Amino acid sequence: MADLIWLHEGALRRTHPVFAMAAPGTPAIFVWDRARLAAGHVGVRRQLFIAETLAELELEIHDGDATVLLPQLAVAHGADRLLVPASPDPAIIGQLVMIRQAVPALTVEQVADTAFVTLSQEPDLARFFRYWNKARKAALRPHGV
């Protein structure tokens, strides 16, 4: 079984568990999808951060539509499994659906990560600052706990 890793902007680190799921030497891909970044209102500063982070990682960077490029890259790499860091982002989830439709033989697995912060009760997500005021103390401790 040949694997391919799609690393998206929600998981830009070499220590993500997605790398442990794949065999050593598995190619990692990042797709600079301008349309998705624009639709998600990703600003210039965030894009600069993404670019600087990508410069530190060993991976292939491709420019274009992820739903078009990833099926092509999976075929080019002979991959039958695409490993993706799990994301709640509806745009990424939608792209995964389209990739599955484009290459039905490709198994797409989302790999969960450990939580950034563990709260004692369900947060009020109506406003970010209400959430952050509760999560800040735990998030700023070493190792998030």
Image (tube, rainbow, N blue to C red):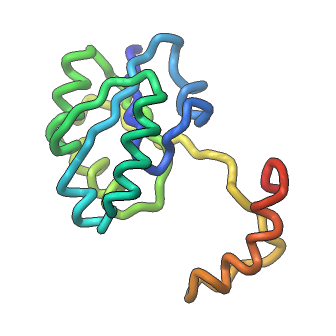
- Residue appearing at x 47%, y 11% in the figure: 25
Question: How many numbered circles does the render carry?
Answer: 0
Considering only vertical position in the picture, is 16 above or below 131?
A: above
The quarter holding residue 74 reads top left
The quarter holding residue 2 reads top left
How far across and down, in percent of the image, does residue 28 sit? 40, 25
The quarter holding residue 45 reads bottom left
Can residue 41 be seen here? The reply is yes
- Residue appearing at x 78%, y 60% in the figure: 140
Task: Say which of 107 and 36 sits in front.
Answer: 36
In the image: residue 141, left or right of residue 41: right
The quadrant of the picture occupied by the N terminus is: top left
How far across and down, in percent of the image, does residue 15 sit? 62, 32
Task: Say which of 60 and 49 sits in front.
Answer: 49
Task: Say which of 3 and 16 sits in front.
Answer: 16
The quadrant of the picture occupied by the C terminus is: bottom right
